[in-house]
């Protein structure tokens, strides 16, 4: 088996003196969906930040397409083809939906109107609300803006931290469908999810994190079938 | 009927026209303050003296032009010299950014540290201006003095009261309008303007989108210095240039920015006119005005609400009242 497209391997580090992550490993292939689940405070967001270069690592390596990218700043990682939707503050609230997408494409020098059309096709509601400030949208619509913004660079990897936080079950299903669509275009998707069952259902690979460590790693299907995982992390 | 017209003309001449010009100057100053606040997240106390520095550069180059026999005909030569004044203020701002503010940005210092640093910068700019051009009053307006003279107006209309319109007043309002439109166009239409708004809205996400913070800071200083120079020059043309007055202008300018909602450009403009008109209306002598409106009434005093020496108190009172009722300012502040 060849090396995964994106991998954070044996990541150890934290915000200050104390480590939050302990030799944590996450990976994803192109066209695949990898899902990270785990209790609150497990370090899921921290692990995402580590992969994106927003957290200093004491140990471990992040590789993108076999290149070690530890020394790249987050901005440089964006240019290298990575997109990130953080858990909080993931839209420009005072900018219109269209401006949010334009800012997503900020590093692009070419004509990005085609990509914007694709985003509008994926999320038709955004086309409708294009001229409205993102801060005036509903939670679910905002998450669509956030994902759309990250797609504007035409990334090869999309990292989503709880894209369905605070949205209704129906909208959540819709969002998961969209994420499947995005993955089908060949983009690698690494996402953190609180709705573990539904997320593992669409996942090719799943990581269960506890206290900054990998607890279980398997295919989504296998994790869903594992009685111990079900009991401890999926509510039975 | 004639009496009412006379009263209106009197009011326009002494309140409306001067208020409009002064309001435009305050609005331009407040726009600079609000822009720095929105992007760099601190209240720049050096802005008043930056206005003085920019105006000084304009005046010095005006003298050079006049010495070479170049004037702008009916318009003040200072308008030709304005780009040089702006360039000087931009360079000075960038020097202080490199030597002072960048250090604190790298440390992610709290806003209060920036504010105190800006007070230091204020004293330095203040010193430079006084050393270079002196502390005295300088009048540098040339070209046509009046668009309409009071006497001409009286002859034209047959009214007892005259309405004078000085060319500097009209220039102030026109230039301010052009600058405001250009600024809004830049912020809402250009790539860099939108990037500035994005950075002001959510710094972390702006970084994640690949927006270069150094570029944003650079543009912010360029625009703020240009606004300061234009405001300072217009004020100097309209009244006169005296370094100390620019330091005093800091209060009404900040009041305008805060009352409007600091960080919000619309607010800065609205705040500028609000403060200016309030100052002018409460310090105006209403005696003659009411003599026209209420025939047969001979008021005892001058009917002035507040003596001119207290005009700065007006800014303060409005500031306190607005902050009590609506702490975010009239237009919600914080981001551009
Ligand atoms: N900016 C920060 N500075 C210091 N410590 C932090 C910071 N952010 C998170 N932490 C700490 O790191 C630990 C892991 O937090 P993290 O946000 O990664 O958890 P999470 O798994 O994403 O949780 P949730 O499901 O609630 O989002 C927590 O103990 C938290 O207190
Ligand atoms: Mg989290």
Image (tube, grey):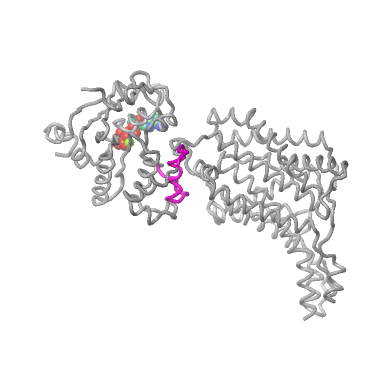
Q: Where does the image place residue B253, in percent across and percent down from the top left?
A: 67, 49
Left or right position of A9 against A102: left
Given residues B312 and A223, the one toward you in this image is: A223
* In the image: residue A233, left or right of residue B90: left
| Residue found at x 24% / y 50% | A169
| Image quadrant where residue B163 sits | bottom right
At a point 52% along the width and 47% down the height, the residue shown is B335
Q: For the view shown, which residue lies furthest in the top direction?
A: A59
- Is A222 inside the magenta-drawn segment? no
Taken as a whole, is the magenta stretch helix, strand or loop?
loop
Of B183 and B125, nearer the camera is: B183
Ligand 1: image quarter? top left
Q: Is residue A101 magenta?
A: yes
Q: Position of A21 compared to B310: left or right?
A: left
What residue sits 25% from the left and 44% below the top?
A176
Please name whichever residue, B323 or B192, is drawn nearer the observer in this view of the structure.
Answer: B192
Look at the picture and state if A205 lies above or below A71.
Answer: below
Tell me if I can see residue A191 in this picture: no
Q: Which residues are magenta?
A: A90-110
Quadrant in the picture for the C terminus of chain A: top left
Residue A146, how many percent across, how many down? 37, 44
Is residue B144 in sight in this rendering? yes
The answer to which of A162 and B42 lies nearer the viewer is A162
Q: Hey, which quadrant is residue A57 in on the image? A: top left
Residue B92, image x and y in percent? 70, 34
**Number of callouts:** 0
The quadrant of the picture occupied by the N terminus of chain A is top left
Q: Position of residue B164 (x, y in %)?
A: 82, 64
């Amino acid at each position: 088996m060849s090396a995964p497209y994106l991998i954070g391997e044996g990541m150890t580090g934290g915000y200050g003196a104390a480590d939050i992550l302990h030799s944590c490993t996450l990976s994803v292939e192109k066209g695949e969906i990898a899902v990270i689940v785990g209790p609150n405070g497990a370090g899921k967001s921290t692990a995402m930040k580590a992969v994106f270069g927003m957290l200093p690592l004491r140990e471990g390596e992040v590789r993108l397409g076999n290149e070690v990218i530890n020394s790249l700043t987050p901005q440089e990682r964006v240019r290298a083809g990575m997109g990130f939707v953080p858990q909080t503050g993931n839209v420009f609230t005072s900018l219109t939906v269209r401006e949010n997408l334009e800012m997503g494409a900020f590093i692009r020098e070419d004509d990005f109107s085609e990509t914007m059309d694709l985003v509008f096709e994926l999320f038709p509601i955004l086309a409708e609300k294009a001229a409205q400030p993102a801060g005036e949208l509903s939670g679910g619509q905002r998450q669509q803006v956030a994902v759309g913004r990250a797609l504007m660079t035409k990334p090869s990897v999309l990292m989503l931290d709880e894209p369905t936080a605070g949205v209704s079950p129906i909208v959540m299903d819709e969002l998961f469908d969209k994420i499947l669509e995005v993955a089908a275009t060949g983009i690698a998707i690494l996402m953190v999810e609180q709705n573990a069952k539904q997320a593992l259902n669409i996942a090719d690979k799943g990581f269960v994190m506890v206290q900054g460590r990998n607890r279980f790693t398997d295919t989504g299907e296998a994790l869903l079938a594992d009685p111990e995982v079900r009991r401890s992390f999926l509510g039975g | 009927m004639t009496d009412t017209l006379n009263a209106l003309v009197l009011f326009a001449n002494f309140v409306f026209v001067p208020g409009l010009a002064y309001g435009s100057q305050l609005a331009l100053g407040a726009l600079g303050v609000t822009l720095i606040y929105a992007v760099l997240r601190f209240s720049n106390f050096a802005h008043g003296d930056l206005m003085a520095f920019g105006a000084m550069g304009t005046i010095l180059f005006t003298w050079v032009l006049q010495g070479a026999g170049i004037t702008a005909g009916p318009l003040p030569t200072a308008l030709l010299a304005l780009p040089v004044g702006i360039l000087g203020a931009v360079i000075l701002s960038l020097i202080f950014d490199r030597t002072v503010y960048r250090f604190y940005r790298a440390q992610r210092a709290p806003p209060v540290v920036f504010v105190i640093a800006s007070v230091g910068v204020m004293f330095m700019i203040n010193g430079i201006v006084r050393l270079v051009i002196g502390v005295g009053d300088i009048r540098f307006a040339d070209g046509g003095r009046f668009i309409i003279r009071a006497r001409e107006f009286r002859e034209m209309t047959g009214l007892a009261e005259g309405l004078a319109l000085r060319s500097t007043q009209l220039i102030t309002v026109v230039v301010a309008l052009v600058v405001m439109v250009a600024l809004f166009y830049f912020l809402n239409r250009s790539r860099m303007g939108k990037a500035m708004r994005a950075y002001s809205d959510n710094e972390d996400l702006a970084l994640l989108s690949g927006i270069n913070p150094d570029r944003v800071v650079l543009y912010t200083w360029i625009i703020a210095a240009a606004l300061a120079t234009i405001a300072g020059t217009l004020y100097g043309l309209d009244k006169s240039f005296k370094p100390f007055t620019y330091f005093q202008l800091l209060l009404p300018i900040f009041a305008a920015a805060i009352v409007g909602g600091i960080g919000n450009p619309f607010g800065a403009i609205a705040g500028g006119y609000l403060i200016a008109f309030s100052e002018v209306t409460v310090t105006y002598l209403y005696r003659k005005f009411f003599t026209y409106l209420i025939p047969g009434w001979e008021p005892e005093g001058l009917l002035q609400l507040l003596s001119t020496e207290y005009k700065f108190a007006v800014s303060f009172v409005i500031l306190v009242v607005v902050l009590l009722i609506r702490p975010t300012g009239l237009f919600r502040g914080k981001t551009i």
